[in-house]
Structure formats: C-alpha cells, structure tokens
Amino acid sequence: MKDVLLSTTWGPFHEQFFNTSPIDIMNQRFSRGCDIFSMNGHLHMNWAHLIAQNIDRPSVFLEYPRKEDFLEEVDKGYEYIGLSAFHNQVDDLVEMCKAVRARAPRSKIVLGGFGAVGLEATRTQEELDALCDHLCHEEGTTYFRWVLGENTDRPMFHSHLPKWGYSLPMLNPHPVGCIPVVVGSLGCPNACDFCGTTEMFQHRRVEIMSPEQVYREFQRAWRENPNTLQFALLEEDTFQNVEYVQELGRLLREDTEFGLGYFNFYCLSSVRSMSQWSFEDMAMTGCSTVFVGVESKFAGDNGYGKKEGLCHKEVFDGLHHVGISTTGAWMVGFDFQTRENVEEDLQDFIDLYPTLQQLTRVCPFPPTPMWKAMRDEGRIRDDVKWEDVSFYGGGGMVLSNLYEHEVGEIIERGYKLLYETHGACIARMLHVNLMGYEHFMEKRHRNRFFEDRALYHKRLAYSFFPILKAMEIYAPNSTVRKKMKDIRRMYIRLMGEPTEFQKMLEQGFTLRSGLARLQDMLHPADNNVTEEAFKKYIYDKPAPEYPDCPYKVEYPHRTRGFSLNRQARANLRRALTGVERVTRWVGRSRQDRPDAGVAPGSFGMFL
C-alpha cells in the first residue's frame, strides 16, 4: 500500500452567507460591502503541509478535490488517510469516511480539524469508531507522528506554504498568490467561550516555528519576489508573546538585505496584549496589519478578559497613526446585545475606522463552553444543519433578544454603513500608510530604523494611489468623495505629484471601474460563486534541501483558458514594468519623485 493521503473535504463547498466561497475571505468578509471595490481572494489549507513536511513517510495532499478526484486517489490504496474539515463541512466529511470504508477497508482513517472535534462532541463512541480509526483533538503534526510510530519530540519546520492572494475582481478574477504564509504557533490561551481554536488546542499556545525560523522564511520569500506585498504570520494572539515578537522584530529590522523597508507581516492580537506595547514598538517588529477581535463594545463588561487595557478607540487610532492597518472584527447575537443597545454597539465599531472589517454573528461551535451551555439550556435547535454551523449560519443558537432575520439585516447594514462612512477598504489602506509614512519621516532622526519603515509605507502608498481617482468618481456619496480628495491632497503633500506612470494607471483603473459598474448592474457579482481549483501536492521523501520547495504540485483540471489568462497577465505585468522603468528614466533628474526608492513592478499586486 502507499503511505499517507491527506485531503480537505470534497467540493464544491456549500454556499455561505453572501453567496461566496468560504475560502474567499476578502469578498466574504474583510472588504465586503465596498461595491465594485470589494476585493476577492483565496487562501489555502495549511494543516496538511505542516504534517507532510514533518513526517518521514511520503504523502499526497488533495486540496479542494471533487468527489471523483478523491475516490480515484483512494482507490490507489493508502495505509493512512487523513481528513480535516470545518464544522460546516461535517456532512461531507461523514460521506467521505463512509466512502473510504467501502472502497478501501484496509486504510486507516485519521480525522482532524474543527469538524472532527464537532463530531466528537455530538456522536457516540460507537458511531465514531464506525467512521474513523483515530480522531485528533490537539496539534495535528505531533498526533500524526504518534499514529505513524515516529519520534514525536523532534522539532518542527515548514516552508513554501502556498501563498494567499487578493485583488480587485475587475482587474483579476483569479488573483495570483502574493502573500506568503508561516504558522508561528497554534492555539490560544485567551479561552473565549465561543472560539473553536481555543477549544481545539485546549487553551494552550503550541509553538511551531521559532523567531529565527520565521525570519528565515521571510528572507526566502522576499528573495524570490522583492515585491511581495505582505507576510501572514499565523498566531492567535501574537503580541501576547512579548519575547517571541521582540526577537523576530530584531531579526527583521537588522537584516541588511531587506529590513523594515520590505519585511512586514499580518497577524492577530487582542487589546489586552497590545496594551503592553507602545505603538511605535509594534511597528518596529515589522507588523503592518493586525486582526483585532473587537467582538462588541460591551464584551469587556461581560467576561471577555482580552478586552482589558486601552479602549478600542485608543488602540485603533494608535495603530493607524503609526501606519499599522487593522482588520476589525465585530459580532452580533450576544445575550447582552438588545434592540436598545445594538445600534450603539454597531456605530461604535464603525467609528473605529477599521481598515478591513469582519462582521459576523455569534456562533457556538461544538464543543466550546458556549455551545455546551446553550445545549444544556435547550438553546441549540434540534433541526440545525451542519452547514449552518458557521459565523454566518449561527449554529442553531436561539437568540435572546433578536430575531434571526434581524441579525442578517444588521450585518448587511453594517457593511453598507462602513462603505458609506469611510469609503472602500483600499482607500483606507492608502490613508493609513500615508499616516505611517508621515509619522516615521518626521521622527526618522530618533531611530535609524524609522526611515526603513517609512520606505515600506511609501511603497504601499505608491502602489495603491492609482486606484484612488476611480474611488472618488464612483464614491457612494459626497461625504466619501470629499474623503477621497482629502487623501489625494495628503498624498501629494507628502510624496509629491503623481508620476506619469501613475497617471497612466489611474486612467486605466478609472475606465475599468466604469465598465465594472455597468457589468455589475447587468449581472451582479454575487450571482457567481467561485469554485476553488483542485490541486494535488506530492511529497516524496527524502525532501529536497532547503530552500528548495519540498513538494511538487499538479493541477489536474486546469483549463487551457485559465493558463492563457495567467500567461497574459504575466506578460501585462512585464510590459507595464518596462513602461514604468522608461518613465522613471525620462524623469530621472527629480530626486523627490514618489517612486524614489520603490522597486518597479510593485503595482503588480493587483494583476
């Protein structure tokens, strides 16, 4: 028999709230509601790569297969088949287990992920034994090593995790990967009662990569592409781990090849953890964007300890002032939210001016403490479907003070209000980077690394600027239109008049935005649900030496049209980069140009 097969659940995925792919978090959540300027994107499942790169056996990983793809691979005969799922994919997970039992009875099934933990909480041991041989309710790599009889204590390392990506649909419906990913740790000790991650790892932080290893991956990624947009450092509460982040920041800013002019990362953290830091010190670690779980204005008074410290407004304003963008997350459906206070709660979140946003409903994931309490109170409906156990389905929770339809309406209206108050997320990102550029340029005499950080903000502002004119023309109201003009004046004050190349891109973006508006009127984008491409990753052993990629990847269903589209966009990027180089050479006598110090081609993140 072959060794190890790993797989996500088979697709296509069930449609979620907003009629989008659950893998497209930019459109489903983070930039939702921005009209034609809502971004699209994709992410990848990291769990299988962590396992495959840290076991001695050869393995194959199927990411987003269709049913026929999965069954064809199962028929080849594997000793172990590892499956992972989210809660809302449990029905598919169960069907896959039954199919493996029928077609490959000698294969041992290992279940993991949030869906497996949800099954564990809702099925008898006899039912679980019929579905699988092992069920993982902890860190997966160590568990899989134990299943295989390998050394569970040896250090872990991973590299070349598939890149996440995002763009504007009008410019690229299939964004290329532009965000490298590294998993610093798993789990979270904050123990929020609704959090599946906290429950999965039993309130612990499990370190996967040391600061030195994370830094090593940063170097590799930027050497491969100096125009890399951002790194995603996956941890649940990054700034809680003070010594860890301080050491990573030291390595990044003291790097003489790239430094803080290029190195930067997206992370997650809490108000309590960030209250330990000055905002400048956070910026000096290389942090460029923070996901902040606001949850609710009233959460701190209702048992959520991670709200201790500074108030939300102080944190968001402080982060923005030093150029750190924010992804603010707000939830509706808590027992302490009523019709009398929920509008105040929502408006308080809007006033935070989040750069990106996530508005969701409270969902008790089994077997979190909230789910157990709700179940014991009889507040989990008997007819709830697994596909509704999500931040938009609600998980069958019976609300105390609101009707079901009110929750969806509040979320929809919240996204709309954010856009009509602050403009599109891309404009907010540009504004925050201009604030960061101004802050560090004014104070660059205080710290030798401040000028490096200013260069980072300059690079981002230069790249985002050409879309600003279109966001002004197609603004939802006069208030937002004025804000776009104010941001434009701020850009020119700090960085000078746009270059000829930026003006050319600006005209192109404006024209394409008009066409996108017309297209959306005739055929709204929400009518289309993206089906994620099936990819097959092959891990032979022994693995190639670092920094070579440890796997081979196949795209069994890639069409010629898709390949031609990718090639055409690559050619367009090269052509535009050539034009950019020429325009810079023509204007080379100007030393204060907005593109001074910015590598040509940075605009390519949109293409």
Image (tube, rainbow, N blue to C red):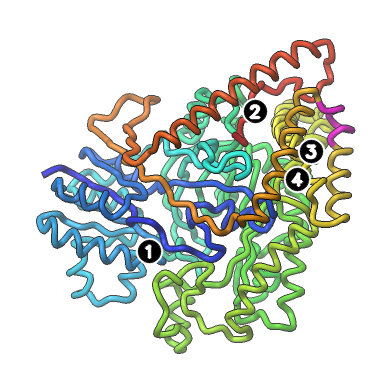
Image check: 151 left or right of 381?
left
Examine the rendering and report whether any part of residue 276 can be seen.
no
Q: Which residues are magenta?
A: 491-498
Of labels 4 and 3, earlier in sequence is 4
Q: Which residue is mark 4?
A: 427
Give the foreground label among 3 and 2.
2
Image check: 106 left or right of 129?
left
Of labels 4 and 1, earlier in sequence is 1
Amino acid type of the residue tagged 1 in the rendering: Gln
Residue 383: x percent and y percent? Answer: 40, 83
Quadrant occupied by the N terminus: top left
Give the foreground label among 3 and 1.
1
Vertical placement of residue 509 versus 81, above or below: above
Q: Which residue is mark 1?
A: 89
Of labels 3 and 1, earlier in sequence is 1
Residue 263, image quadrant: top right
Q: Which residue is mark 2?
A: 602
Examine the rendering and report whether any part of residue 128 can be seen.
yes
Spatial separation of the CA atoms under disc 3 and disc 1: 42 Å
Amino acid type of the residue tagged 2 in the rendering: Ser
In the picture, the disc for residue 434 is: 3
Amino acid type of the residue tagged 3 in the rendering: Leu
The count of marks equals: 4
Q: Residue at x 20, y 57 (%)?
A: 109
Of labels 2 and 4, earlier in sequence is 4
The one nearer the camera, 478 or 237, is: 478
The one nearer the camera, 319 or 105, is: 105
Give the foreground label among 4 and 3.
4
